[in-house]
Each structure stands twice: as structure tokens, then as C-alpha cells.
């Protein structure tokens, strides 16, 4: 037992107690997500579909076509690309976010709090949007998209009417910006600079989000980062001696 405690002191920035506290924060947010999903589910599905069709009407009015359909048709003709965008959709939100948060916590702990708070604030804003304005994704609207989610994971682990704003888009931008700033390798910087754009492409090509959903997600991410990092900068300046 003493060896485990000693290992925690050596390898964990704040020891086991701090790790437990951070896990409590993340699991607490997961519970909050499920509660918000429960509130959203109380609204008739017709509301989510009406909001989704409003997005369709807006995009077709502005661009006179649904470019997301073109992306999906392009991807569906290329098996490797189809596999890549599907993997990205399923893993960018939880696997990649989770691993990058863990890496920053262990390796660049000085940047962890800002990173964590930006992710949590963006997701909190998104949850409010899902409760107030539930929106069906493109693949459920009957406007030509293929619905490839038939394994039940959506119904078990996610809110099916959480298209607006796209938290995939929001979290990818926050992850890309933070990791670009923290990584030293030029190859790593190039990868994380491209990451948000790739995720936006993937979520549209899989029929899960419109470009308007992604733009809303980008706005949410920028708002969250401005609030978090502006507050941290002000706090830093406040403690400096005159």
C-alpha cells in the first residue's frame, strides 16, 4: 500500500487525492449530462425535428444546397475514408478528449486547469442549448442522408437530438488549440492544427451535423476559452506585485 502511495507522489502532479478530485469533477459532469438529457427527452421529438428542418431551410436559403450531402456521398464511395470519418466521429469526443486531458494533467499540469475548465464550460453551454433547443441531426431528417447508427450506442450513450451546437466541433477546437500550444514537435503541431478541421469534416460527412451546427460549436468553444483564459490572465495580473 505504501508503495502505491509513493508511486502516486512520484508520478501524479497532485498525488492520489488530486487525481480523485479531478475524476470526481469529470464523473459529476457526466451525471449532469444525463440529467440534462432527461430534461431534453421530455420534449416531443417533433420539436427536435422541427428545429432540424429549420437548419435545413436556413442552409438551403443561404447556399441553395446541402453541402453535407455532397461530403457524405464523396466519403461513402471511398471505404478507407468512410472508416476514418466513422472512427473520428465515435472517438474524437470521448477517447481523444479523455487522452489529451490525461496527457496534459500528467505532463503539462500547469496548463491543465484552463484546458479542463474550457472543455467543461463549452459542454455546459452545449447542454443548455440541448435542453432549450433540441435539434435532430441530418441523418434523422429524411433529406437524403444515410443513417449508419444502428448498433444502439446512440440511444445508450448520447442524446440523439443534440445536434445544435456541435460539441464535437467545440471540443475539437479547444483540444486543437491547447495541444498546438503545448506540443513542441512541428509534426505534432501540424497534426493538432489540422485536427479541428478534420473533425468538422467527419461529423458532417457522417450525417451527424450540419455546417451551421459546427459553426455554433466553434462559437461555443471560443466563448468558453475567452471566459476561462481571460479570467486566468486577470487573476495572474492581480497577484503580481505593483
Image: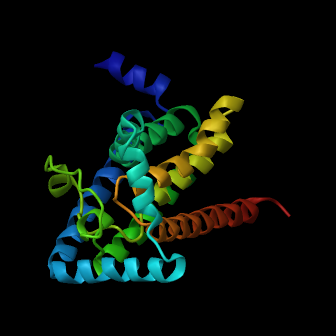
From the viewer's perspective, is residue 131 above or below residue 225?
below
Report x, y in % for residue 103.
50, 34
Report x, y in % for residue 112.
54, 46
In-front residue for pair 8/28 = 28
Q: Is residue 205 left or right of residue 188?
A: left
Q: Which residue is drawn at 53% across and 76% down?
A: 63
In-front residue for pair 47/127 = 47
Q: Which residue is drawn at 53% across and 38% down?
A: 104
Report x, y in % for residue 34.
21, 63
Q: Which residue is drawn at 20% across and 54% down?
A: 154
Q: Is residue 110 visible?
A: no
In-front residue for pair 90/117 = 90
From the viewer's perspective, is residue 19 above or below residue 132?
above
Indicate the quadrant containing the N terminus: top left, top right, bottom left or bottom right: top left
Residue lying farthest to the top in this orientation:
3
Q: Residue at x 53, y 63 (%)?
A: 221
Report x, y in % for residue 73.
38, 52
Q: Is residue 9 left or right of residue 128?
A: right
- Rendering quarter of residue 235: bottom right
Amino acid at each position: 500500500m505504501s508503495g502505491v502511495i509513493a508511486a502516486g507522489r512520484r508520478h501524479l502532479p497532485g498525488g492520489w487525492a488530486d487525481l480523485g478530485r479531478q475524476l470526481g469533477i469529470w464523473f459529476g459532469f457526466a451525471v449532469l449530462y444525463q440529467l440534462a438529457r432527461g430534461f431534453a427527452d421530455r420534449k416531443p421529438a417533433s420539436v427536435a425535428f422541427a428545429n432540424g428542418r429549420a437548419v435545413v431551410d436556413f442552409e438551403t436559403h443561404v447556399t441553395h444546397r446541402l453541402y453535407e450531402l455532397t461530403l457524405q456521398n464523396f466519403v461513402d464511395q471511398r471505404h478507407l475514408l468512410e472508416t476514418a470519418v466513422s472512427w473520428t466521429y465515435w472517438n474524437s469526443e470521448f477517447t481523444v478528449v479523455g487522452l489529451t486531458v490525461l496527457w496534459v494533467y500528467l505532463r503539462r499540469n500547469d496548463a491543465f486547469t484552463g484546458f479542463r475548465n474550457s472543455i467543461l464550460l463549452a459542454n455546459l453551454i452545449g447542454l443548455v442549448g440541448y435542453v432549450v433547443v433540441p435539434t435532430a441531426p441530418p441523418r434523422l431528417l429524411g433529406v437524403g442522408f444515410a443513417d449508419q447508427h444502428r448498433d444502439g450506442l446512440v440511444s445508450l450513450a448520447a442524446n440523439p437530438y443534440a445536434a445544435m451546437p456541435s460539441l464535437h466541433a467545440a471540443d475539437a477546437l479547444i483540444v486543437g488549440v491547447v495541444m498546438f500550444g503545448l506540443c513542441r514537435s512541428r509534426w505534432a503541431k501540424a497534426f493538432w492544427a489540422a485536427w479541428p478541421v478534420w473533425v468538422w469534416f467527419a461529423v458532417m460527412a457522417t450525417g451527424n451535423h450540419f455546417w451551421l451546427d459546427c459553426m455554433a460549436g466553434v462559437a461555443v468553444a471560443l466563448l468558453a476559452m475567452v471566459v476561462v483564459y481571460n479570467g486566468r490572465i486577470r487573476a495572474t495580473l492581480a497577484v503580481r506585485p505593483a
